[in-house]
Image (spheres, helix red, strand yellow):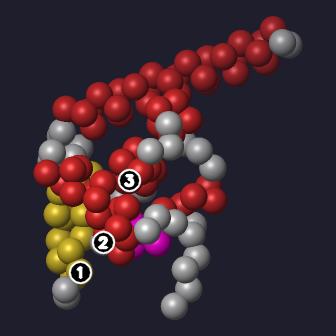
């Protein structure tokens, strides 16, 4: 079985760039950057290039707080999605949207003024 890591090769998202590279943020971030997908814990560990021990330790807190929830079961695998209704996730989504708009405005200003 291949241990190819795809997610970490895509570069840093705004969330990771602004808030840091902690395991919990990386777990939240993979759900943000893949909003239409759900993941098993094994898939998350593989995609994040994280040991299962590190993933499980950090995932437990996110699950206990209701930040990630079970979306479905496929055979023996439990799949998870981010809880879009959780206050923390709503706030992070607003922050990321605002940051994106500010970056976009700065880029437009650079082009308009030749800076």
Closest to the observer, 103 or 62: 62
Earlier in the chain: of badge 3 and badge 2, it is 3
Q: Secondary structure at mark 1?
A: strand
| Residues shaded magenta | 43-47
Q: CA distance from mark 3 to mark 2?
A: 12 Å
Lateral position of residue 96 relative to residue 69, left or right? right
Mark sitting on residue 47: none
Q: Which residue is mark 1?
A: 77
Q: Which residue is mark 2?
A: 40
The answer to whether mark 3 and mark 2 are in CB contact below 8 A is: no
Lateral position of residue 1 relative to residue 38, left or right? right
The answer to whether mark 2 and mark 1 are in CB contact below 8 A is: yes
Earlier in the chain: of badge 1 and badge 3, it is 3
The answer to whether mark 1 and mark 3 are in CB contact below 8 A is: no
Lateral position of residue 31 relative to residue 15, left or right? left
Q: Residues within 10 Å of mark 3 (few under 14, many from 20)?
A: many
Lateral position of residue 23 relative to residue 86, left or right? right
Residue 1's place in the image compared with 99, above or below, is: below
Q: Position of residue 8 (x, y in %)?
A: 57, 58
Q: Which residue is mark 3?
A: 27
């Amino acid at each position: 079985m291949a241990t190819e890591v795809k997610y970490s090769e895509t570069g840093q998202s705004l969330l990771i760039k602004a808030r840091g590279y902690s395991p919990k943020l990386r777990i939240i971030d993979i759900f943000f950057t893949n909003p239409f997908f759900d993941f098993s814990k094994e898939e998350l560990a593989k995609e994040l290039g994280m040991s299962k021990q590190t993933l499980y330790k950090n995932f437990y807190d996110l699950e206990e707080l209701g930040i990630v929830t079970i979306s479905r079961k496929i055979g023996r695998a439990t799949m998870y999605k981010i809880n879009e209704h959780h206050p923390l996730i709503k706030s992070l989504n607003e922050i990321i949207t605002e940051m994106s708009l500010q970056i976009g405005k700065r880029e437009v200003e650079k082009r308009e003024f030749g800076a």
